[in-house]
Image (spheres, grey):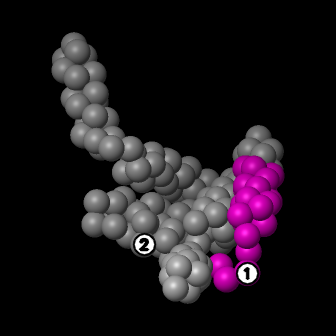
Amino acid sequence: MVDERTNLIEKEEKEESGYFDLDWDERIYVSFLWLCTAGLCTMLSWVSARQGRLGSFAVLTVLSCVFTVCSSCSMSGTKVTLSSLFTPSRRTATLLYLTSLFLLFIFGYYRTPDFLIMLTYLIFFFAQAWFTLSYIPLGHTTCASCCRTCCSLLPI
């Protein structure tokens, strides 16, 4: 009876994570590979930016972010990661992040003017920061409070 219950719990955990045949060592290995690929894309994107190829910079930056999400999916599973992304407390931040990611990819891929790519990257940067703060308890509140305090200290 205990073995059946244990097997049922393990089966439910595997179904919830989305990985039926990977153990933890394999998940860590796959996640590490995704992270290494994301790191490589990040380094290549900065090389492209230094060379003035902002379209390549934008596309490689987006790929790096996608590979990072894939790393998270390989550790905790696709269902858990997606449900975490779209919880009510971070739904707006996720949508803003994904929209800016999509726009950055489109503008970089179709080689729009550099000004537009940099503007979209700036929006993406702040959207990514806001998205990251959604994972920290009271992150948005603390950040907004710090910004208000800093703005009140400015002589106007």
Nearer the observer, 57 or 75: 75
Whether residue 88 sits left or right of residue 59 in the image: it is left
Residue 86 % position (x, y): 38, 70
- The prevailing secondary structure element of the residues shown in magenta is helix
Q: Which of marks 2 and 1 is nearer the N terminus?
A: 1
Q: Where is mark 1, residue-wise?
A: 21
Confirm or deny contact between disc 2 and disc 1 (CB under 8 A): no
What residue sits 51% from the left and 68% below the top?
81
What residue sits 58% from the left and 81% below the top?
3
Can you name the residue that lies furthest to the front here?
Answer: 1
User: In which quadrant is the C terminus drawn?
Assistant: top left
Q: Give the range drawn in magenta.
A: 18-42
Residue 55, image quadrant: bottom right
Residue 154 vertical position relative to residue 119 in the rendered view, above or below = above
Q: What type is the residue that disc 2 sits on? A: Ser
Q: What type is the residue that disc 1 sits on? A: Asp
Q: Residues within 10 Å of mark 1 (few under 14, many from 20)?
A: few
Residue 146, image quadrant: top left
Residue 126 visible in the snapshot = no
Q: Residues within 10 Å of mark 2 (few under 14, many from 20)?
A: few
What residue sits 43% from the left and 66% below the top?
85
Q: Where is mark 2, residue-wise?
A: 83
Badge number at residue 86: none
